[in-house]
Every structure is written in structure tokens, then in C-alpha cells.
Image (spheres, rainbow, N blue to C red):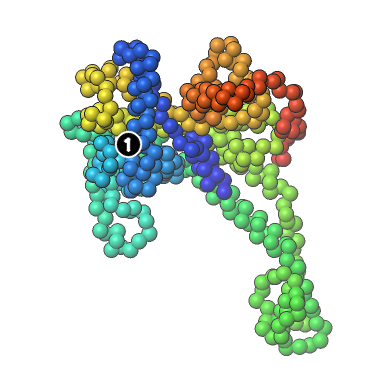
Amino acid sequence: PVAGGAINTTVTHVVGTGLSLQCAIDGAFLGLDDDAADAWQQDAERKFNAWWESTDCDITRTQNGYGLQDLALRAECESGDVLCVLTQAAWAPGPVKLALQIIEGDRLCNPDRKADAPRLVAGVALDDNGAPTAYHIASGNPYRRSGAAVQSKLTWQAVPAFGSRTRRRNVLHLFDRKRPGQTRGIPMLAPVIEPLKQLERYTEAELMAAVVSGMFTVFIESEAQTNLQPSALDGNGSGDGSGGWDGKMGNGLVVELGKGEKINSANPGRPNAQFDPFVASIIRQIGMLLEIPYEVLIKHYTSSYTAARAALIDAWRHFRVRRSRMVDQFCGPIYEAWLDEAVASGYVRCPGYFGSPLVRRAWLGAIWIGDGPGAVDPVKEIEAAERRVALNISTLEAESVLHDGGKLRPKLRQRQREQKLLSEYGLTMPAPRAAPVSPDPLPTDTSPMPGEPE
């Protein structure tokens, strides 16, 4: 549960319902006024979302772009890295034939399981500078448990990292690079896999001990000399007692013993009162390395409002870093490849796009917006947002994104339509009222958590 919860929590907070595109071109550099820039951005977003929000962007025609984001990040967390091949789909209905193929990291390995070499490391071919030139992808998972005949039929394909003529990126390699020269990623749970396994064993042992201590077994010792073997009757008295006792305890079990045979029972003393504090201590250490606070990792907020909010803020620092890397390695390059093909096919008009790198970069400006962190106390969060905007240290757009991840412009359009509808019926929007002061919705007890020192 802890291992799966850590991955699920990371994916849910980083991707959530999906990172959506918001074009942010450099209109001043491109010679466009605000109205022209807004019109181009709305048109580009509309055309991109028509491809991104359909299964046409997936080579397997199974998930849309938001589902691929979830799949890619989850695969990276579990395997350490994941590949996304930018390919072409002949069946694509629109002018853009770009399609994405997500490939698990286990399939990236050296051909025929050869040993690593200076220019071939774990399936990645490198040039003299250490830059990837090709990725060797197996036709199946070489680590899957299957027959020798199936494994012997595996083939490898060397996919160039960049196009030979256009230098366009063909493969996106998602992983967290921790040191210079690193070519492959490390699974998210690899540094804590040993304590996680020991914690699982300890939990199973405590659970079994609690089950054994909960069984009620009666042993009957006879003074008469008999040749009967130890026999057992269940709590309902069924059975003839001739089957013998198999040495297992059971609920309401009655066991008959022979003369001179006695039972020395040991009380396991379960449930163990120190179980929860010990497990909590181990989980805190695991969360510390994963950069997920204890409260967020176990999804249990029992301290105070301040402590809960501090845990969420600390966790979101980590989630924002992962989201930024997701945008840099996955979302951004995909939008760049889509716009390249859209401009080349005439689907989107960008004057000077292929003529200058600066002009191209100005057209490619974009922001990827995801779900907001939410609020522990909505009233306090709204008051803080109002004060930040009033002090000119934030904007309405930034606060809108921070609130629920939504863009400001669609909200303003919807508010305009609502006000127009109210006026048609002779109604007015009530003025906002100051919220009454209410106690914290969460307990403010600052006593230590179970297992913590006073």
C-alpha cells in the first residue's frame, strides 16, 4: 500500500486530470497586436486540442493526450524511464499525421543482451560527446517470464534519436538525470525498496499474530489410558474425533489429547501497541526520501490546520518540479512536433516559422496548466489571494491557475454570459459579502503524533 500509494499520489498531483495547453506567443516580437495574438492563440489551441483530446494522437488508438500523460509518468515512476516515439499514422483523419507510441523502459536494452560498451549503455547508443544517437528497442519485454522459445525470437530495432536531415527529435526519453553521464533513469522506489519490503514482512507477521491470538482453542486432557490419537472437533461439536489433530488452531476448535500430553501456550500479546508508532516512523523516513510528507503520503491529516497546510505546501514543491520536468521532456516537445507538421502542411499559418530560430521559438511559446493544489481552508485561501492581487504581487490569471488550474479568459467569458442572462430576466448578481469568522475546520491540537516524543 505504501509503495503503490506513493506512485498514485505523485501521478495524481502532477498530472491529475491532465496538463492542458495555453499558447503564449511573443506577439510583440512577431509584430502582432493583442487582438491578433489572442485570435491566433485561440485558433492554435482549438486545432491542437482537436488532435490532443482524441485517440488519434495515440498510435494504439486507446487513450487521448491526457491519458498518455498519466501513462508516461506512471511508467517513469515504476521503471525509472519511459520512451515516447514520435511516429506517423496513415489513418489519421486530419492534416497532422503525428502519433505517439509509449514504450516501457524495460524494452530499451542492448541487442542480444550484449554487455555495455563506451558507446552503448543500457540500449542507448551515444556519440563522442555522450549525446544519444539511437535507442535499441526490443520487440517484447526481455524480462517477462515466458518460454525460452519466445525469448529467443526477440528482435531489436535501432530508432534514431534525431532525424538525419531535419534533426527533428524522433524519440522522447523521460527520466530524471541525477548525475553527469547518466543515460537511464532510476525507479522512484528503488532507494527505498528494502525498507518497503521489510515493512511488508513486518506487517504480515503482525497481522498473522493478531489472527492467531484471536482464535479460541480448547484442549481436553484425559486421565484414562487410551490409545486414541489427538483428535479435533470444531466449535459446533461436529466430527467424530477420529481424524486426528493436524496441529493447526482454529476458531472455536476443541482438541482431545492423549494421556500425559499437555499444551504449553504462549500469549502473543496482539495487537501490538507499538506497531503503529514504529510503522509511522518508517513511513516518515520513506516519505522524506521521496519528498512526500508523511501526512500526504498516508492521506491522513490529524494534527492542526497549520501542520496540514505546511505538509501540502511542501509536497507541492516536489510535485511542481516533477510537473516542470514533465512539460520539458514530454508535453513541450510533442507540441513542438505537432506545430512543425501543422505549419509545414499549411494547417496553421506562422509567417517566418522555418526561416529563423528566434521566430520559431516566438511562435512556440506555451504554458501547460494542470490541476491546482486545492485549499485546506477555502476562506483563508481566498482572502490571501485577494491581498496578493491588491498588493500587485500576483495576477488574476495566476490566482485562477492556482485555484483550480483553469484559465482566466474562459471564466470571464462565462461570467459575462451569466450577467447578460441575469439582466435579461431583470435580476442582478448579489454583491459579495464578507465571510463570517469561523473556527478552523481542522483540529488545532498541537499535541505530538503517535510515536513522537512529548
Question: Where does residue 248 sit, x and y in percent of width and height?
Answer: 66, 72
Residue drawn at 69 percent across, 70 percent down: 249
Viewer can see residue 125: no
Please tell me in which quadrant of the rendered image residue 182 appears: top left
**Label 1 environment density (alpha carbons within 10 Å; few <14, some 14–19, many ≥20):** many
Q: Is residue 252 above or below residue 67?
A: below
**Nearer to the camera, 110 or 134:** 134
Question: Where does residue 57 sit, x and y in percent of width and height?
Answer: 33, 41
Residue drawn at 32 percent across, 19 percent down: 362
Quarter of the image where the C terminus is located: top right
Residue furthest left as drawn? 165
Q: Given the image, on which type of amino acid does mark 1 rest?
A: Leu
In the shown orientation, is residue 335 left or right of residue 71? left
Q: In this view, does 67 lie above or below 209?
A: above
Please tell me in which quadrant of the rendered image residue 443 appears: top right
**Nearer to the camera, 403 or 134:** 403
In the shown orientation, is residue 52 left or right of residue 116? right
Viewer can see residue 297: yes
Q: In this view, does 214 lie above or below 279?
A: below
Residue furthest front as drawn? 425
Name the residue carrying label 1. Answer: 172
Q: In this view, does 307 lie above or below 363?
A: below
Residue drawn at 33 percent across, 43 percent down: 56
